[in-house]
Amino acid sequence: MMSYWVNFAMHGDPNGLGLPPWPAYDEEDVVQIIDATIEARPNPQAARFRFLGSFRQNGILPMRWRDVP
């Protein structure tokens, strides 16, 4: 993990020699899973994030959930 952070701080890109590729997050919902094995795979929480994002109004979540119409 530290190598990813150092690469990102120095180059604006976490990828580097000897590291599994870290893809940019996009509409494909592929995320980097950092566990015993580091790998990029579909986001297991993608449906949850889309649900929460559905409450956004003009790109902003409401300050309080009771304010949601």
Image (tube, rainbow, N blue to C red):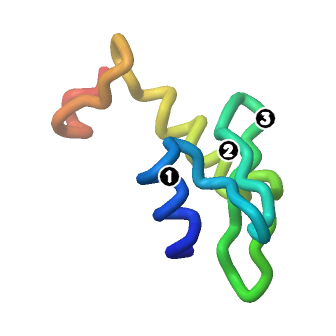
Residue 30 x %, y %? 76, 47
Distance from the alpha carbon under mark 3 to that under mark 1: 22 Å
Which secondary structure lies at badge 2?
A: helix
- 20 vs 67, nearest the viewer: 20
- Badge 2: residue crowd in 10 Å (few <14, some 14–19, many ≥20): few
What secondary structure is marked by label 3? loop
**Residue type, mark 1 in image:** Phe
Q: Which residue is mark 3?
A: 28
Which quadrant, please, contains the N terminus?
Answer: bottom right
Residue, x 82% and y 57% (percent of image)? 41
Q: CA distance from mark 2 to mark 3?
A: 12 Å
For image coordinates 70% across by 67% down, the residue present is: 33
Toward the viewer: 16 or 32? 16
Q: Amino acid at mark 3?
A: Glu
Task: Give the side of residue 67 with respect to residue 7, left or right.
Answer: left
Label at residue 8: 1
Give the SS element for disc 1.
helix
**Quadrant of the rendered image containing residue 29:** top right
Relative to 62, say whether 14 is above or below: below
> What residue type is disc 2 on?
Ala
Q: Nearer the viewer, residue 9 or 29?
A: 9
Instruction: Determine whether, in the image, residue 3 is placed left or right of residue 35.
Output: left
Q: Position of residue 68 (x, y in %)?
A: 29, 27
Q: Position of residue 36 (x, y in %)?
A: 74, 88
Residue at position x 50%, y 42% from top? 12
Question: Could you tell which of marks 2 and 1 lies nearer the N-terminus?
Answer: 1
Q: Which x, y percent locates residue 22?
A: 71, 54
Q: Which residue is mark 2?
A: 47
Q: Is residue 60 above or below residue 45?
A: above
Q: Nearer the viewer, mark 3 or mark 1?
A: 1
Sequence order check: which comes first, mark 3 or mark 1? 1
